[in-house]
Image (cartoon, helix red, strand yellow):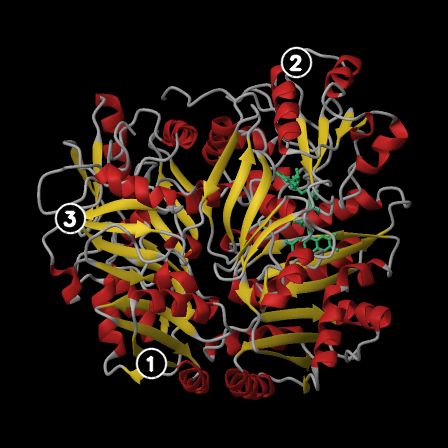
Amino acid sequence: MNQDISQTLQQQILSALETGSQLQIQGGGSKHFLGHISKSTPLQVSAHQGIISYDPVELVVTARAGTRLSELENTLAEQNQMLPFEPPHFGPLATLGGTIACGLAGPSRSFSGSARDYVLGVKMINGKGEILNFGGQVMKNVAGYDCSRLMAGAMGTLGVLLEVSLKVLPKPAAEITLVQSKTPEQAIDAMNHWSGKSLPLSAGCYVNGQLYLRLNGAKTAVDGAHKVIGGELLNDSAEFWTSIKEHQHTFFQSTLPLWRLSVPAKTPVLTLSGENLIDWCGAQRWLFSDHDADHIRKDISELGGHATLFRRQSELMADTYQLPDTNIMQLHQRLKLAFDPAGIFNPGRLYPGL
Amino acid sequence: MHTELFTIATPPEPTLGKPALVEKLRQFLTSDAVLCDEELLRPYECDALSAYRHLPMIVVLPSTLDQIQQIMRLCYQHNVPVIARGAGTGLSGGATPAGDGVVMSLAKFISILEVDPIARTAVVQPGVRNLAISQAVAAHGLYYAPDPSSQIACTIGGNVAENSGGVHCLKYGLTVHNVRKVKLVTMDGELITLGSDSLDSSGYDLLALINGSEGMLGVVVEVTVKLTPIPERAQVVLAAFNDVEKAGGAVSDIIAAGIIPGGLEMMDKLAVQAAEDFVHVGYPTDAEAILLCEIDGTNEEVSEQIRIVHEVMHQSGATEVRTARDEEERQAFWKGRKAAFPAVGRLAPDYYCMDGTIPRKHLPYILRRMAELSIEYDLRVANVFHAGDGNLHPLILYDANHPGELARTEEFGGKILELCIEVGGSITGEHGVGIEKLQQMHLQFNYEELTQFHAVKHVFDPKGLLNPGKAVPTPKRCSEYKQLPSQNEDKHQHKACTSS
Ligand SMILES: Cc1cc2nc3c(=O)[nH]c(=O)nc-3n(C[C@H](O)[C@H](O)[C@H](O)COP(=O)(O)OP(=O)(O)OC[C@H]3O[C@@H](n4cnc5c(N)ncnc54)[C@H](O)[C@@H]3O)c2cc1C
């Protein structure tokens, strides 16, 4: 599909401005569970589709925000390339715009980086209805403030993404996953230890007493590292990591609230009770717990991290995202005003009142 | 049509004269930390873009965080512009003083506060030199990846401000990819922390925003950098070409082969000859261009990929392909590249270093146009190119003592940047806009985009006192822009004016 509806979107924004109404930006709806969705008029971006330019040797792809993430990844895969931050889809309808707005990254995060790390440029509409271009289609660009990376993780509260340019990379030639039985303490030590070595490590996760370490790279490199690290070869490496990334692994079957805890990688085993999975070589912990939200957030803050209430079965019991310190929150409010002075985009989706 | 976001503030008039300000500063700074005599101020009049000079009113050299905050509060209260300064190696005039402003040197903040080999991070003060970080952590088998050629001198504070790159960016990223946390003092003296010791933080990515903000949003007072394991092995291949276009083609062919080199650099004939004359590392001086391709990783991986690189280079038409025999020769190959600027600098009394980026496929066209312009302007140009990521550094040779030659050089430089934009690139890949490229910002960004930048500035610095007149020009409507004389309009203008 190839369709440019930017004029329509701009018109809708301008009329929302005129009538003083608010808009909730919708892509594929695959991450609607993140953040508070206000009762506002939907702004449907998913029809704004199509890969605009992709030249594999330039390592850059530019696509409209409504482009399906699956379509984008398939196109890259045909050229043996990929999005290095391995974004989770959480459903077949996931779009590029939503992927960047939510700023989520998959298993490779601690080695390859995050969504924002691969953003090279965006075309967007701000809250005044102006179509703006920031960044570009080149690897390096420091002209002006980095407004394009700022859009990653902003949950659409600063503007509507129209197009995103991303850096892409070749798929590694070989991939294997090694499995070792460990206690959680041993697993955390091992993940930090191997992360500090010159090895083609690309993901590390601990679940149900097993440590999984993924190696990616040249065949010789992967085999060499296998000898150094040791462990059993996992049968279907790709399937396992997809199940972790997409929350399809049996671990994720609980009905309790699911917390995403972003912590320093060397954080010891959590004292918070509840089933947990260690991801990102220690830096991301998934926790099922019905502890009080403030309690969890206080504990995790003390560790130097923050806690996101990722999924829940019941009605809202707490905000999705942890509030930052007061002075940082003030910057958020002023940035929001700078991009969206009338407050029309995704009110409250990220933080109450923002 | 709509209410403006804000009006771009004309920085308010200072409410303290120099003597009174010096007196107030000396209440909490020792007298040798407050410079106000001309001969002491002289070293601060420019950065590495020495064509632009301006004597500051005062230079302060604080040594504690508390002093930084006091200086900022005082200047904020009295509407005095502040310009942060690291090592002054910036190439776009970002640290050029304002005549009515205070230059705040971070030169005394040179401590590495903490190295955590397990977390693979180091906490450093802003004045710590880039290379000093890698040296301090080498014993742990780690290093700080971004390596600007100026790394023996430039500071991490300056690196964050410019989002500096180096020869290893394609694989290891820019400064923004290698910084975890920044402590920042805003213009009103407040201390804030951006980022965290985790891999992400809740809310807007303010850390990304601060990288490359050219000292306009806050003063960086502490940086937590990510450290990278030193690769088990690194090996470099030098390939010579009798045609620049073939060299450009080889770059694409290497990437098409699925290889992401640790470094992939190109130098043209003039640059190669200059470097060879300067450091004698055995570069083939008859080549039209050379490529340096470094592969790093595990031993096996490096052997495998070096073999592929060899093949690809030959297939792409290299006349000679050499793998460094040993670590010494590898260092020598790089030495020539890292010394390229000063080496080219020896060919003429002055040189002007440009910094545009382009989609790589347009390299042949750009080089051809540049050669034509070189004849047109009667100025020689040497080319050093971070080929892997499309970042050009044309070095224009000139003699400032010849009347009109600097102006011609700047015009030529401006034309090169216009070419970069024409092919979909950017006017700066890593050196920043500073005061140098304010004019070209109008080509890359329209009125609304520039206005949006000013709105961001306003968020952090509503009075417009921090590094005024840099990086983002006053937005002009298209019609107004066309009437502008070609160069320098904005360059010496340190006060933004009201838009509309
Ligand atoms: C020979 C040579 C080679 C170079 N090679 C490269 C290269 O390969 N890659 C590259 O990217 N750059 C390169 N540069 C440019 C330059 O070295 C970098 O831009 C460097 O990051 C500047 O650091 P500095 O400490 O010298 O900063 P300065 O020049 O002192 O300042 C640069 C800017 O940063 C601001 N600033 C400085 N410190 C702070 C702080 N603590 N808080 C807030 N703002 C601050 C200043 O206000 C100014 O706007 C090179 C320069 C030279 C002379």
Residue at figure coordinates x 29%, y 45% from the top left: A307
Asked whether, in this view, residue B4 is left or right of residue A144, the answer is left
Residue type highlighted by circle 3: Pro
Image quadrant where residue A69 sits:
bottom left
Asked if A129 appears above or below B182 in the picture, the reply is above
Disc 2 crowd, CA 10 A, few/some/many (<14, 14-19, 20+): few
Nearer-N-terminus badge (1/3): 1
Image depth: mark 1 or mark 2 in front: 1
Q: Which residue is mark 1?
A: A176
Tell me the element at label 3. loop
Residue B419 placement (x, y as % from top left): 60, 53
Q: Which residue is mark 2?
A: B13
Tell me the element at label 2. loop
Residue sitting at the far top: B15
Residue B490 placement (x, y as % from top left): 66, 31
Residue B368 seen in the current view = no
Dot 2 falls on which chain?
A: B
Q: Are marks 1 and 3 in contact (CB under 8 Å)?
A: no
Image depth: mark 3 or mark 2 in front: 3
Q: Which residue is mark 3?
A: A257
**Pointers 3 and 2 within a single chain:** no
Dot 3 beta carbon under 8 Å from ligand 1 = no
Tell me the element at label 1. strand
Disc 1 crowd, CA 10 A, few/some/many (<14, 14-19, 20+): many
Q: Nearer the viewer, residue B58 or B109?
A: B109
Residue type highlighted by circle 1: Ile
Asked if A351 appears above or below A134 in the picture, the reply is above
Which numbered circle lies on residue B73? none
Residue at figure coordinates x 72%, y 50% from the top left: B412
- Label 3 to label 2, Cα distance in Å? 56 Å
